[in-house]
Amino acid sequence: MNHLGSKSLETNRLVLRKDTDGDKELLWEYMFSDKEAAKACNWINFENKEEFLNLKYEIPDNIYNWTIWLKNKNIPVGGISIHHQEDDYYHAEVGYSINPKYWRLGYASEALEIVLDFLINKVGYERISGECRIDNIASKKVMEKCNMKLEGIKRKAYYKNGVFYDNYLFSKIKEDYK
Ligand SMILES: CC(C)(COP(=O)(O)OP(=O)(O)OC[C@H]1O[C@@H](n2cnc3c(N)ncnc32)[C@H](O)[C@@H]1OP(=O)(O)O)[C@@H](O)C(=O)NCCC(=O)NCCS
């Protein structure tokens, strides 16, 4: 494995990069002060701006966490990260979210595609997986659009507010690029 950290990645319309202290005002304005977005995307619910501004970023090279920015407008619209990693097994699980104001524009698919390529072909993971609740049609489509393969359904894999949900399990492996 060749850990590179959350290097900046660029697509046609997006720049993915790790947060810096200089980004905080824009992150607050476009993402974290937006209660509806934070709720839809399960972002950390900050009490107030001060709490957010006081947060210290110290992200080591084996942690992968990008904010997704619109390239031409310099607006942050979402995030994508490794949620869970098992480096001994060359496996990691990714997750992503986009502010609802920017849904259905293809941004999640565009971001996931370049992150999968980076993690498998540059960092050296053999397998990247992703999961979503079976009622999360949008997230399922995002993984399908990135040519991840459906491996099956994990029963009762997600629990929220007293209810269990089944999850789809998708993956992409190094051989899928050949
Ligand atoms: C899942 C999520 C990231 C998708 O973001 P997005 O940028 O809107 O996704 P895309 O625009 O790349 O859409 C991918 C496909 O899903 C479709 N899609 C998007 N939202 C949809 C919805 N609500 N219902 C049905 N299809 C939907 C798009 O039309 C597109 O398909 P198409 O190319 O055939 O038109 C976004 O809905 C989100 O942040 N949801 C909340 C957090 C979440 O669920 N994250 C995933 C956790 S597993």
Image (cartoon, rainbow, N blue to C red):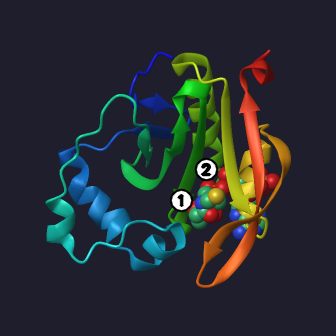
Which of the 4 image quarters holds residue 24? Answer: bottom left
Q: What residue would you read off at disc 2? A: 108
Percent across and percent down for residue 50 are 14, 69
* Residue at 25% from the left image edge and 77% from the top image edge: 47
Residue 91 image offset from top left, x and y in percent: 61, 32
Q: Position of residue 38 (x, y in %)?
A: 43, 71
| Residue 90 can be seen in this image | no
Residues at marks 1 and 2, CA–CA distance in whole angstroms: 7 Å
Q: Which of 81/102 is in front?
A: 81
Categorize mark 2 by other alpha carbons within 10 Å: few (<14), some (14-19), many (20+): many
Three-letter code, disc 1: Ile
Disc 2 CB within 8 Å of nearest ligand 1 atom: yes
Which amino acid, mark 2?
Ala
The residue where tag 1 is placed is 98
- Mark 1 lies within 8 Å of ligand 1 (Cβ measured): yes
The residue that appears at 36% across and 64% down in the rendered structure is 30
